[in-house]
Amino acid sequence: MLTEHFPVLLVVVPMVAAPLIVLARSGFLAWGISVAVAGACTVMAAALLARTTAAGTISYAIGSWPPPWGIEYRVDAANALVALLVSAVALVVLPYARRSVSAEVGQDRQYLFYSLVMLCLCGLLGMAMTGDAFNIFVFLEISSLSTYVLIALGRDRRALAAAYQYLILGTVGATFYVIGIGMLYLATGTLNLADLAVRLPAVTDSRPVVAGFAFITVGIALKAAVFPLHAWLPNSYAHAPSVVSAFLAATATKVSLYVLMRLTYVLFGSSAAFADLPVGGLLAALSVAGLIAASAAAIFQKDLKRLLAYSSVGQIGYITLGISLANVEGATAALAHLVNHGLTKGALFLLAGAMALRLGGTRLDALAGVGRTMPITSFAFVVMGFSLVGVPGTAGFASKWALVTAAMAGGHWWMAAVVLASSLLAVAYVWRFIECAYFREPAAGAPAPGEAPLDMTGPALSLSVVVIAAGIHATPVLLAAERGARALLGAAP
Amino acid sequence: MSVLGHFTYWATVLLMMTGLYIIIAKGNLVKKLVGLSLFQSSVYLLYVAPGKLIGGTAPIVGEGFTVYSNPLPHVLMLTAIVVGVATLAVGLALVVRIREAYGTVEEDEILAADAKDD
């Protein structure tokens, strides 16, 4: 049956689509293929999520080589959820891409753009699906290499410098990860994650394993842009084409955060020896620093996309704060915020892209009076901004509430105070947009643009509606996140 | 084990730190890529050296073959070499484009040009 092969098809379909698109050489055909692939991936990921909910973990042996010798794809409630987020965001972003890419990328290079998006999708889904530590590295590099090129396609020459900076830091991060995995392999002789979790407790008092853990954590944290390793992120998101910013902000760092969760809980949570290491405390301290510093930095940006990028670094702090609690409630909050913030930030970057199309840029000065000229887009942007702040009725509130509850249940009252403080900072940076859009006159002689075309506003607004729906009816995401958290922590469902 | 007995590890650490230092300290974009390449190459040694047993052969099941070297690290590093080559190629292509756009490959001059644009 075909459904049995969904775990591998989810990765192989976009991988095969990438060279097919290059052969097609037509921008329109390339776009059609990539939308179809994103649709197929979403269906497969949804089916996998439904199956893990009903029947628990699915183990898929590539080429029928039994694990731990062969590469195993292991799907549980956590990574099926992440895969669904990634493919669903791709499905929303790609229909939007048609017009946005026509405006921002040269006509002769458009088919290559879609090919790269497919490679990036393949890498991200592969990182989510695989149960093999070295396989994660390979897919990490597939997604990263395509990401560097996608960012470099931005109109501004600063996109090139940003892509180069990301290439250096991203490669250092990936190499740190592979060094760490090498040390674990030397100590245990296995690369299968489930097998590693069984064998690690016997060797955790050896120095290379502890060093390996440090290398892995730093490497993945670099890719996930955990403060203070976020230096590559603001420039990359600010200068990349709008579609790329939206897709990456919603998926790339989120998949890395999922990998961080999986490795921290599955590998290193399995052993009491690691309980002595101050990992949780360190991660909590960095999260708090990121929450405050990055949110404060966002207030002073001159460019809307850069503002959103700094806000992303801050919001990642909520997710890592949840991870640092290292219990089911904390992991639930982290996974829920991972999904909710991914959707919110995707919608925000899509809306910013619609403004960029009409106004020729996203500098806040250029956005003066946009509340009157593009009322629907601006209104949706403000509502999505409320989701960043965590106003009740938006998705951002549901997961922040889960985080605060989890922190208080653990007796960490100060965490609740920090979450509140950083939410106030979020009010300040969202206000920056409101002030420009609604309280400033458009510059004299500026063109009076209308709303962006429907094929751009449509996907952006439908994603916004999803965010609101996930805020009003928060239970499905929270339940799915809780199932994922239990799967990650090995707790009984 | 003696210090000399671990010479492959010393070589690995030396290469790794040299590469990382070049990435951090050099402002020239091409030199940074050289450092990055060196840094990645050191990992090949980290993996391959412990897989080799003195007197070990390829893993062949048969008469006269008793001690095997581990072939898996070699296979992993083949993948890592491909990744390294691809990264270097993308990196150099970016440097060519940066040279066309900015007229320089020095980091401080690029930052100065960006600051002037703002």
Image: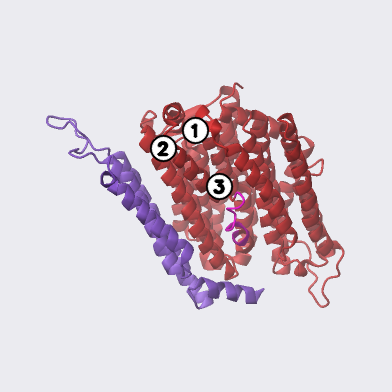
Which subunit holds the residue at mark 2? A
- Alpha carbon distance from label 1 to label 2: 10 Å
Count neighbours of disc 3 (C-alpha within 10 A) and say few if under 14, some if 14 to 19, many if 20 or more.
many
Circle 2: residue type: Leu
**In this rendering, is residue B40 above or below A188?**
below
Colour applied to chain A: red
Percent of width and height locating residue A471: 77, 39
- Residue A343: give x, y in percent of width and height: 68, 46
Residue A422 higher or lower than A415, as above or below: below
Could you tell me how far apart the alpha carbons at marks 2 and 3 are, in whole angstroms? 18 Å
Which type of secondary structure does the marked residue at label 1 adopt? helix
**A83 versus A440 height, above or below:** above
Q: Is residue A115 left or right of residue A179?
A: right
Indicate the colour of chain B: purple
Magenta span of residues? A226-236
Residue A85 painted magenta: no
Residue A218, percent across and down?
52, 47
| Residue at numbered disc 1 | A267
Which quadrant holds residue A31?
A: bottom right
Comparing A137 with A273, the one in front is: A273
Task: Write down the residue under mark 2.
Answer: A184
- For residue B19, side relative to residue A221 (left or right): left
Q: Is residue A470 visible?
A: no
- Which residue in the structure is indicated by mark 3? A221
